[in-house]
Image (spheres, grey):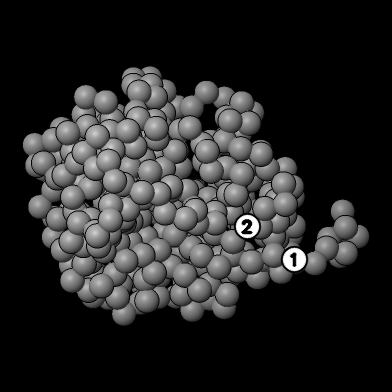
Amino acid sequence: MRNLRMSFSIPKQITDNHGRPVTYMRLAVTDRCNLRCFYCMPEAGIDYMPKKDLLTYEEMLRLTGILAKMGIKKVRITGGEPFVRKDLMDFMERLVQIPGISELNITSNGVLTAPHIEDLKKLGLKSFNLSIDTLDRERFKTITRRDELPNVLETLDLLMAHGIKTKLNAVVMAEKNIEDLIPLVQMAQDHPIEVRFIEEMPFNGSGTGYSGQLWDHKAILDHLRQKWPGIVPLPMVAQATARQYQIPGWAGTIGIIAAYTRTFCGTCNRIRITAQGTLKTCLYDDGVLDLRALLRGGANDLEIAEALVKACHSRAKDGFEAEQNRKPVTESMSTIGG
């Protein structure tokens, strides 16, 4: 093993066993969340990891530095809800200074974000994905089990006022928010935002109660076309998860993400690192590498890089294969990393 490690050198671009370059990392900074969205976790919440079991910021920075040498250029900060973790802004200021990291993005529910918008602009944030499943306050309370829509809308207003590229993420749920699809799309008429609709997934923290795939990407598009027959597809963007559309003359766009149908796996360029340091090379896998154990077990950068390469070289070809190779889904999206 020693000779193997001595002969191993960190690749400038990590590539999986299907020839796909890996350039994008989703990094969860916490598994905690201040909402209780029913499609993500039970009303009582989930069993959060003890603080000592979460990666420290120093460990995250070290991992990012290693991966940046291996071709990771884009980092998305996720949770849980990232802004419930203390000192997040200080961490991100250090993160963007890592050589090779050229793009920082955030996915957040926006409840705690408004006070940080100006600093995010100064930080050079590339884009902000705002999770918002409805514009109706009562339905928001029903879906999230919290009355926080005014704070989310304040964040949205400030994001647009500061010119930060904004995407609205809405999970489409039968008998929950179908009437909200049209009002959400109308946000893109006068604002240069992307309104994105996501197929519901079974990561609700219980393994039960999943409503099934009643509203897949085709049904969502058909619903929108009933209102706007002239909606047109935009050119495909390499490695994008969303299929984009536009209504002629509108300032913004509409995206549909086939998160359960998994039509975009063939060009996937992303990996996930959970808050407890588990590497996931696919959203649907069960975790393929314990990076926390390597970090705290004394592994050097070369050994960690070698383990990352090995994990990526055993990657499932798509989300269906990844799901077949694991135990049944029972975890919350909050523990996976958004």
Give the number of the disc on residue 98. Answer: none
Question: Which residue, given by chain and number where applicable, does mark 1 sit on?
Answer: 11
Q: Position of residue 329 (x, y in %)?
A: 48, 27
Q: Position of residue 160 (x, y in %)?
A: 21, 67
For the residues labelled 1 and 2, the Cα–Cα distance comes to: 11 Å
Give the residue displayed 20% in from the left and 56% down from the top. Answer: 189
**Is residue 115 something one can see in this rendering?**
no
Cβ atoms under marks 1 and 2 closer than 8 Å: no
Task: Give the farthest residue toward the front.
Answer: 230
Name above or below for residue 72 compared with residue 313: below
**Is residue 61 something one can see in this rendering?**
yes
Q: Is residue 253 left or right of residue 57?
A: left
Give the residue displayed 24% in from the left and 60% down from the top. Answer: 249
What is the total number of numbered labels drawn onto the structure image?
A: 2
For label 2, the SS is loop
The answer to which image quadrant residue 104 occupies is bottom left
Q: Residues within 10 Å of mark 2 (few under 14, many from 20)?
A: many
For label 1, the SS is loop
Q: Is residue 243 left or right of residue 184?
A: right
The answer to which image quadrant residue 229 occupies is top left
Of 129 and 207, which appears nearest the observer?
A: 129
Give the residue displayed 32% in from the left and 53% down from the top. Answer: 246
Callout 2 amino acid: Val
Give the residue displayed 44% in from the left and 38% down from the top. Answer: 258
| Residue depth check, mark 1 versus mark 2: number of the one nearer the observer | 2
Q: Residues within 10 Å of mark 1 (few under 14, many from 20)?
A: some
Q: Position of residue 242 (x, y in %)?
A: 43, 48
Of 177 and 56, which appears nearest the observer?
A: 177
Question: Which residue, given by chain and number where applicable, does mark 2 sit on?
Answer: 22
Mark nearer the N terminus (1 vs 2): 1
Of 153 and 333, which appears nearest the observer?
A: 153
Callout 1 amino acid: Pro
